[in-house]
Each structure stands twice: as C-alpha cells, then as structure tokens.
Image (cartoon, rainbow, N blue to C red):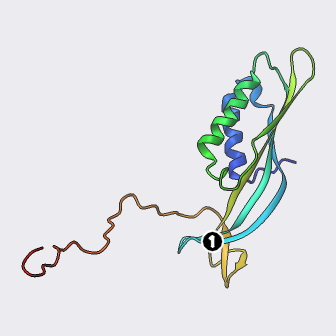
Amino acid sequence: MSLRQGYLLQALHQALHAALPGKCQGQLDSWMENGTLRLDPKNMGPTGAILGYLSYQAVYTLEALPFRDCDPAVLLATVMAWLQDYDSERERFELPDPAFSIEPNDEHSADLELQVDFVEALRLCPDEQGPIHWAGRRWVVMPYDLWVAEAALLQVGTLQPPATIGGTP
C-alpha cells in the first residue's frame, strides 16, 4: 500500500513523473518508510504552530524501466536538482545524500529504486472543531498562513547632532 502523506514525497514524485516520457510515467510508484516523529513544538503566532517534525525515507521505484528510452541519469539529475531547489531543510537536519540502485532485468529494462530522506514540519491550525487536543486548544493538521514581511523600516536610536561642550562640537 502506498502512503502519499508527505508533501515533500509528493512534490518530488510529481517532478520525477514530469521528467519521464509518457510511456514510462505509469511505472513510477512512491511511499514512506522508516518514519519517526520529532517532538519540537514552535508557536507560529495566531495562524498556527509546528507540533514537531516528521522524519522519513521516501522510496521511489520504477519497475521494468526501459533504460534505452528513459535514461536513468535524467531521473537522478532530476532528484538532485529538485532537492537543491526545494528542500531547504536538508542542511539544517544534516540529512544524508539520496541513494539509488539499478537492477537489470534483461538487455532492455531494469528496476530503479531511489531512497531520499526527508524532514518536514507537522503544522497545526487552531480550529474549534478540530480533532486534536493540544495545549488546551483544538487543532487540525494543515498548512497555515505564514506572514512574511516584504519591507521593513528599522530605526535604532535617533539621530541627533553631537552635544557641544565649551562651544565646539
């Protein structure tokens, strides 16, 4: 059974799917393995909270990949490029580099398996009808609005002319 719950797992799945020729797209599958929960709550203001982090290994498989028509190097490059562009937490959590294996079936096809470790925040939003009871409130699991300042005015102290002592500055 495939569990498609992690948003990073799903987004990389979509990138791999888009990189495949149409005749190979139906062969791509992915799921989560070896999951752990990191208890590391963080208040994100009135719009929500991070309850902790999901750590898991995403597994992507392509069975009977016709490697003469679907170059495995394109898929591996897609993984590396996507991770560098979209997985901003890799360095923070010191995640290992992805691993892969290719097992030939015959002279025309092979099975490809990729393993990518991910860590993603488990976000909660306040909801009076939510199923989760935490910190004296009710919550739902879902993304929340994150307000990011686009501009700021920073003032440190005030600018005043230097004080004069004895008539000279």
What residue is at 67 percent from the left and 85 percent from the top? 136
What residue is at 61 percent from the left and 61 percent from the top? 143
**Above or below, 49 relative to 62:** below
Percent of width and height locating residue 42: 63, 71
Circle 1 residue: 42
Viewer-proximal residue among 83 and 11: 83
Residue 61: tell me if it is visible.
no
Residue 28: tell me if it is visible.
yes
Query: What secondary structure is marked by label 1?
Result: strand
Percent of width and height locating residue 107: 90, 14
What residue is at 67 percent from the left and 32 percent from the top? 78
Percent of width and height locating residue 120: 69, 57
Viewer-proximal residue among 64 and 121: 121
Residue furthest out toward the right = 105
Disc 1 crowd rating (10 Å Cα; few below 14, some 14-19, many 20+) is: few
Q: Amino acid at mark 1?
A: Lys
**Above or below, 66 relative to 98:** above
